[in-house]
């Protein structure tokens, strides 16, 4: 590489904004104290010309482009395939983010194992663990064949060389924050290093038609450490999340150039690796108390899949002047709003009561279709009267206390029926759309009051 001049540039660690001088607040994302100093080489020849990949490229018409059948390869994990939009796309760059210890390495090692058994050439590059450590993990997971090759390396040049030489079908980089380019003086994990590494992997993925998974650690704020730039560069962003204390894990698609982003995959961490959960509703409802006040089941759509979840509320006398409100797993402001609706529209005086709302199982749901469930759970706890165990509530609540329609009501009701629920409280306006569903009692409600009367 031609030697250029060293220049000092300040980068926002949150959004990647560049500045020639340090600033307290980033003009890009308005975060405070996010600028860090980094030295970059300017005027150097760019990587693409050095590698000779910038060759003449003939533009093509849409009709000339053929979509071959084998453009997607199955990971032999149904949950992951669905989140990816029907399998792994060849030559794609996928970022897998998540808290440390959540199971990213385990998931990807299992993917490698499946794909190697499928006859793909797989390379797993670890910058965090030794070969022995990986072997110990692999032993828990099961048998591996020789199509999977492991490498402990953090130098980008060495990895690039190996990839060009070996030409694997699938590569896993664990993790992007440990990779470094010698030409860049800043430390691994810094904005410029992460950006450089990602752009190199992007080039390799497209140039050599390799599917690459990049592991990225998540910061306290919940974004992948380093700049947001990383998310813009890759084709697919998946977040692996879950309650550290619960055994299940959720893989959530945040960005996907090849499919829908709302899909989730549900896994369970066991002693022998991650197991797919085929029926998440059943899983989420296990342990639901019988005949307890403040508990109601709702149905939320996660991508194309309906999921039944229990909502719990606890309303009790406040010991201090100011009532406490808490929402775990859902939007706090939304819960406050629903409490205000109950006070104003139904005259329920919750001013002297603390209210806690919890989505059981530690999952996060923001869909408005669970509003009716939240309202019913709060009212049930307030009245200290249990809701029928086999009842499920679906509906969005408006500020006038009206129950509004929700999308895909048929799918939701069908899922409830499948899991043995006998009564479904749904918005009145949706009654027509579910005429065909039989074998489950449907109650159409127009307002929150109608629904509360059922308790
Ligand atoms: P790991 O994949 O190392 O997490 P990450 O790469 O996201 O940091 O997951 C480690 C955790 O998973 C660790 O706490 C042990 C647990 N685990 C199991 O419970 N069962 C298993 O079979 C494996 C391999 C790990
Ligand atoms: Mg790891």
Image (spheres, rainbow, N blue to C red):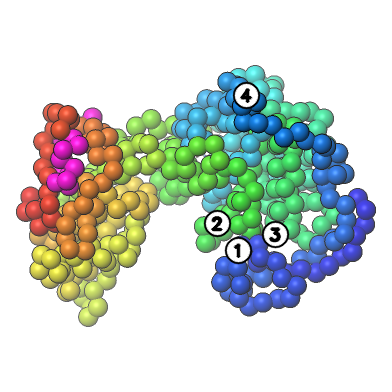
Q: Quadrant of residue 63?
A: top right
- CA–CA distance in space, label 4 to label 1: 39 Å
Q: Quadrant of residue 338?
A: bottom left
Say whether disc 2 or disc 3 marks the residue closer to the N-terminus: 3
Q: Which residue is mark 4?
A: 66
Write the residue at 22% across / 59% down. Answer: 398
Is the C-beta separation of discs 1 and 2 under 8 Å?
A: yes
* Direction left: furthest residue: 453
Write the residue at 35% across / 53% down. Answer: 366
Say whether disc 2 or disc 4 marks the residue closer to the N-terminus: 4
Residue 91 is at least partly visible in this image: yes
Q: Which residue is mark 1?
A: 14
Q: Is residue 110 above or below residue 35?
A: above
Q: Residues within 10 Å of mark 4 (few under 14, many from 20)?
A: few
State the mark number for residue 223.
2
Residue 132 is at least partly visible in this image: no
Is the C-beta separation of discs 2 and 3 under 8 Å?
A: no
Q: Nearer the viewer, residue 195 or 152?
A: 195
């Amino acid at each position: 590489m031609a030697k250029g001049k060293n220049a000092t540039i300040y980068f926002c660690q949150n959004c990647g904004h560049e500045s020639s001088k340090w600033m307290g607040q980033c003009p890009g994302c308005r975060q405070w104290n996010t600028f860090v100093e980094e030295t970059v080489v300017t005027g150097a020849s760019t990587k693409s010309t050095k590698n000779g990949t910038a060759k003449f490229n003939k533009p093509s018409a849409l009709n000339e482009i053929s979509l071959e059948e084998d453009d997607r390869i199955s990971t032999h994990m149904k949950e992951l395939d669905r989140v990816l939009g029907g399998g792994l796309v060849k030559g794609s760059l996928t970022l897998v983010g998540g808290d440390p210890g959540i199971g990213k390495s385990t998931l990807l090692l299992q993917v490698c194992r499946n794909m190697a058994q499928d006859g793909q050439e797989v390379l797993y590059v670890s910058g965090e663990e030794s070969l022995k450590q990986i072997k110990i993990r692999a032993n828990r997971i099961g048998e591996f064949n020789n199509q999977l090759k492991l490498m402990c390396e953090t130098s980008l040049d060495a990895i690039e060389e190996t990839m060009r030489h070996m030409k694997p079908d699938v590569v896993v980089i664990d993790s992007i924050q440990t990779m470094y380019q010698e030409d860049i003086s800043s430390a691994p994990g810094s904005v410029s290093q992460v950006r450089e590494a990602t752009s190199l992997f992007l080039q390799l993925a497209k140039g050599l038609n390799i599917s690459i998974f990049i592991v990225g650690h998540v910061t306290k704020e919940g974004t992948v450490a380093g700049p947001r730039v990383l998310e813009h560069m890759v084709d697919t962003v998946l977040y692996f999340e879950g309650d550290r204390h619960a055994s299940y894990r959720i893989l959530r698609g945040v960005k996907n150039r090849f499919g829908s982003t709302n899909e989730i995959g549900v896994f369970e961490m066991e002693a022998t690796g991650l197991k797919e959960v085929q029926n998440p509703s059943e899983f989420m409802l296990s342990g639901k108390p019988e005949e307890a006040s403040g508990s109601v089941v709702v149905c939320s759509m996660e991508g194309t899949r309906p999921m039944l979840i229990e909502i719990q509320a606890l309303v009790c006398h406040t010991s201090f002047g100011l009532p406490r409100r808490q929402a775990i797993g859902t939007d706090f402001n939304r819960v406050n709003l629903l409490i205000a609706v109950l006070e104003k529209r139904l005259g329920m005086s919750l001013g002297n009561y603390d209210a806690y709302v919890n989505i059981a199982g530690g999952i996060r749901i923001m869909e408005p279709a669970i509003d009716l469930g939240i309202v019913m759970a709060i009212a049930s706890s307030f009245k200290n009267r249990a809701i029928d165990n086999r009842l499920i509530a679906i509906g969005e609540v408006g500020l006038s206390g009206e129950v509004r329609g929700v999308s895909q009501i048929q799918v939701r009701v069908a899922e409830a029926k499948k899991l043995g629920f006998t009564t479904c409280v749904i918005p009145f306006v949706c009654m027509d759309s579910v005429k065909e569903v039989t074998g489950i009692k449907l109650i159409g409600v127009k307002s929150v009051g109608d629904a509360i009367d059922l308790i």
